[in-house]
Amino acid sequence: MNKKIPEVITYLRTAQAIRERCDSIFNLACQDQLNNFQVDLTQLDKCANYVINIIYAQYPKLNIPLHSRWRHFQVGDVPRLAELDQMLAGLTPVEKAKVKFDLAIISVLLDAGAGANWQYTEPETGLIFSRSEGLAVCSFRLFCQGFFSSNPDFPWQADTRGLSQIDVQTLTQGFQVSPENPLVGLEGRLELLQRLGQVLNQDSHLFGIDSPRSGNMVDYLLQNQANKEAIKATSVLNAVLEGLGDIWPGRSTISGINLGDVWPHSLLKSDRLGDEYIPFHKLSQWLTYSLLEPLQELSLKIIGLDDLTGLAEYRNGGLFIDMELIKIKNPLILQQQHLPGSEIIVEWRALTISLLDKVAQVIQEKLNLNTSELPLVKVLQGGTWTAGRKIATELRKDGAPPIKIKSDGTVF
């Protein structure tokens, strides 16, 4: 039995496990064996057409970039990334990549849903942003100011000592939080930053010895590639899950090891250890997608993009409920708040992963593009995430997802 424990954990940390376990829930839904949802695949075509219209509105020539945090840094047509590149002009390419890893990791950790009532006023431009874009611009500006760095002479990093200096008061000020401008899950975000600081000290082969920082993952990835000109997308995900797995609080464990964004479902339980668990690794995959671009800037080719999965979050999931691909069995589900570990949310997220694959396939066929020309990550960007937000604003005044999630700022 003990020999199986590491194997189970290794498996649950793979994109393959995400797909397989989510497909198990999807198959149960197709047989109408789930407690909370049904699927209606007759709506697949309608949903694909809705997303295609969004894709053409945003990218008429279909020159879709990867779905990643870097898109949000450019919101409002402000050339922030050009500003960053100018600041980093004196650094080597590898050092630049390390800075961008630090920035992406910090920004993604702070990226869980902000709630409908928070906004950020960017001092440099006077522009006001909310939700994910607001969190992105805020984290970008704080990063460039050295908010996460212990070294005043090198502000563009997030090192152990710098992270340990952050408390509720400094984070409140940095994010412009007040009773009139509340941010969902502020304490949860602080906890993630503090845990990141601790984790960096625990894994020297990933994060370095002298001045541990998340950007040192660049060295690890470069040194551990047999092919010096290419890197597997799953290798980046593996490093993220191995190095950052202990950040996530209050999660299920096997043999004392934190599983991360992995949740049990009673219908999958069997005599085999870990069969009931469904991994999603939403923030870890969002982070992985966001780390690929700094690696591409080092002239590395990314292999196996479609081995990663879609993201089990409320914009993609909301799209499928609002387009009636996912049908709710009990209307009360829409009236109550649900914790991330509830079977309602676990089922919804699992169905979202499986349906993203299916919608992407239909879109590829309709546009006559193959998976290398239009990989899933570009369908997300083009794409399903924007479509989920758009239909939410069409159907609900506040643009909130159809299902209310009780978020602590560490999952969604």
Image (cartoon, rainbow, N blue to C red):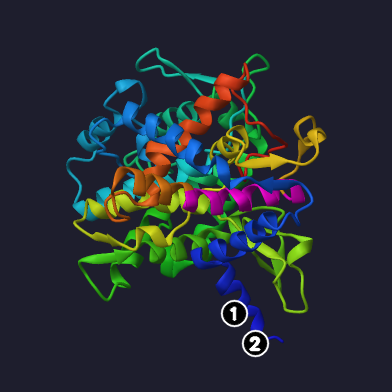
Residue 264 falls in which quadrant of the image? bottom right
Residue 207 falls in which quadrant of the image? bottom left
Q: Residue furthest front?
A: 42
Q: Position of residue 351 (x, y in %)?
A: 61, 51
* Residue found at x 63% / y 31%: 401
Using residue 237 as the reference point, say whether residue 125 is left or right of it. left
Q: Position of residue 270 (x, y in %)?
A: 77, 74
* Residue found at x 49% / y 36%: 46
Vertical placement of residue 18 versus 381, above or below: below
Residue 182 drawn in magenta: no
Magenta residues, start to end: 341-358
**The C terminus - image quarter:** top right
Tag 1 near tag 2, CB within 8 Å: yes
Camera-side residue: 261 or 321?
Answer: 321
Disc 2 marks a residue whose amino acid type is Lys
**The N terminus - image quarter:** bottom right
* Residue found at x 52% / y 33%: 388
Numbered label attached to residue 344: none
Numbered label attached to residue 3: 2
Disc 1 marks a residue whose amino acid type is Glu
Q: Name the residue under label 1.
A: 7
Using residue 223 as the reference point, say whether residue 347 is left or right of it. right
Vertical placement of residue 145 versus 11, above or below: above
